[in-house]
Every structure is written in structure tokens, then in C-alpha cells.
Amino acid sequence: MDQDWTTAVATLRVAGQLVQGIQRGMRARGFADLRPAHGFAFVRLSHGPATTVQLAEHLGVTKQAASEMVRHLTEGGYLRRRPDPSDRRQVLLELTAAGRTATDAAAAAAAETVAAWRTKLPADQLDQLSAALHALAEPGPLRPVW
Amino acid sequence: MDQDWTTAVATLRVAGQLVQGIQRGMRARGFADLRPAHGFAFVRLSHGPATTVQLAEHLGVTKQAASEMVRHLTEGGYLRRRPDPSDRRQVLLELTAAGRTATDAAAAAAAETVAAWRTKLPADQLDQLSAALHALAEPGPLRPVW
DNA sequence: TCCATGTAGTCAGGTTGGTTGACTATATGG
DNA sequence: CCATATAGTCAACCAACCTGACTACATGGA
């Protein structure tokens, strides 16, 4: 149980390092205006268009908060708002080319950070780590850690 | 590299589950007024008293932000402010009995969440996971993930 | 000894990212 | 055709941070 506590601490440390690594990679790629929470929106939208309410549900925030994020990302050129003619209440959100570029950059930055782990851990142990994490990870929307 | 991206996602998922598990455990133990960031302050203070500035450095925030957190935790009865007679500029912060109880509760909640991983992963694989995470975790102050 | 410089902490004010609540416009099922 | 539900916006508020200015105290050197 004391052992479990140190495992928890190590998990938080590694996750923190990963988030910082992604941030750094994004900055290096010229996306300093994007924060971690934006990445989770991109992940959702890269699977297909969504409304603001759907995005809010995915992120676990109110529709008003999601609306503000959408405004920001639209102004930044990452998102396009396309009114749905078949339901004129809703506006479909989709990634622009810049949005897809940013999404790819985030994935690359994350992969780069994980790849750096290979210098600290033999390949087979990293594979085991990955397998164990996949076994523990529950399905559901990917959200900011807190 | 695409493999690394899925490892990154799994890491974020597991870390998120851990944070949520700790939060849930803290709520169940009657500490609904404590947020994750407070835990990191407790960890620092459980190693010995610190000034507000030292706490701010540990948490990676300004002294004003740390000061506000200290005010909140002091009002909640978790911290005691003890003016240092040998340097009358500074006030030493230390955990009260309630603060130590809360710290223990957080550690127990974290351990409980990790212990639940045993139902999903054989003991030897959990040990390997823990060892790999410890190998990757860099030293330094433990801070909120972002 | 005194003073220049540095440090701990507070006060004031602003920004950001979230909240709740109220509202409009549009859709839909009985 | 109307009651009810849904998408989105507006307004007000709040919590957690920030910068900048300030006071009180400490300290090392002329």
C-alpha cells in the first residue's frame, strides 16, 4: 500500500512530464497559442464534425465554456463553423487545414516525448509499460487530467 | 511512432483515472474542500515547515497565488502560520493535525486507486509497470500535471 | 553605524477559463 | 398546432491565477 502510493506518485510525475513534453513540442512547432485542453477538442473533431454541445459533453464542460473555446479556435483559424441546413439550430464544427496540421503536430509531439523514453528504458520494458497502460486505460472521452 | 502516440493517450487516460480516483476517495473521506493542487502543498509541508515563497517555488506559481492558497488552507484548519522569531519577515507554515490527517487520506486514496489496478493486471505486471514508471519519473518537485 | 540592496509578505487590479441562469430560435411528436 | 425539448448566445459571477507596487525586515559592506 505504501508501495502503491509511490506508484501513484510516479504515475503523476510521468504524466506531468508527458504533458510538458507535448507543450514544449507544440511551442517548437509554432503552436504556442494552443493549450492542452484544445488538443482534446481536436481529437474529438478529427473523428468528424460535432456541434458545440457535443464538444462540451466530450470535454466535460458546460456548453458556454465550450462555446468560448470554439470562438477562440475559430478566430485562430483552426475551426470552421458550418451551419447545418437540415437543422438550423445547430452549427457543425470541423477542423480547417490548419486544425488538422495542429492535430498532427500534437500527435507528433506526444510521440516524440514517448520516443525519448526509449533512452531510459529498454525496448521490451517500454512495450510492457505500454501494454500495461492500455490494459488499465478505460474507454470513454479523452479529457484533461483535471 | 503511431505506437508511441497510443502509449501517450493511454498514459493520459490512466493518469486522469488516478486523479479522479484520488478525488473520489478524498470526497468519500470527507475532504470535499480539497483540490488536487492542495495535495501537492501538503506533500511539501509534510517534509517540514516552509515559507509561502518556498511553497510557491515548489508549486511553480507566484507567491501571491501561493499566499491565497495558504489563506484558504489556514481558514480550513489544515495549516498553521508560525511567525519565525529569528527572521521576522517570514512566517513558517506547518500542517495541523487536520492537515496531517488530510495528507494521510490523500495517500490512502491514491493507494486505494492503484490497488484497484490489481484487478485488471496480474501482480507481476503491476510491479513491472511501477518499476518502469519509477525509471521514467524525473526528480524534482511534484506538481499539478498542468 | 548607516545605508544600499535584497527578501518575505501583502494589497490592488486585471485576465482567463470556468460556472449558473435566462433567453431566442428552431425542431419535433402527440 | 401546440407543448416540450434542444442549440446556441448573452449576462453576471467566481476562482485561480497573473503583474506591479508597496511595507517591513535583514544583511553585508563603506
Image: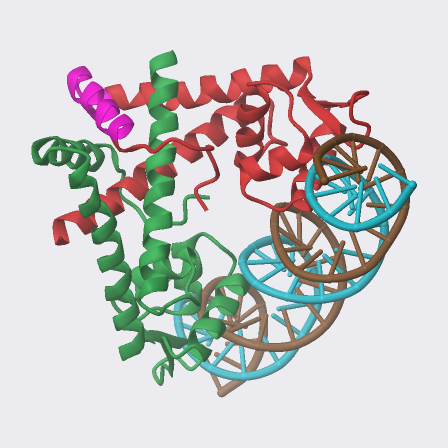
Chain colours: A red, B green, C brown, D cyan
Query: Which residue is painted at 45% across and 71% down in the image?
Result: B70
Residue B47 in view here: no
Query: Which residue is painted at 35% across and 70% down in the image?
Result: B30
Main SS category, magenta section: helix
Residue B77 in view here: yes
Query: Which residue is painted at 13% across and 49% down in the image?
Result: A3
| Picture quadrant where residue B128 is located | top left
Of residues A60 and A14, the one drawn nearer to the viewer in this rendering: A60
Give the left or right position of residue B39, taking residue A65 as reference. left
In x, y percent, where is residue A8?
25, 46
| Picture quadrant where residue B82 is located | bottom left
Give the left or right position of residue A131, taking residue A60 as reference. left
Find the magenta span and give its range.
A119-135
Of residues C24 and D19, the one drawn nearer to the viewer in this rendering: C24
Give the left or right position of residue C15, taking residue A130 as reference. right
In x, y percent, where is residue B68?
52, 68
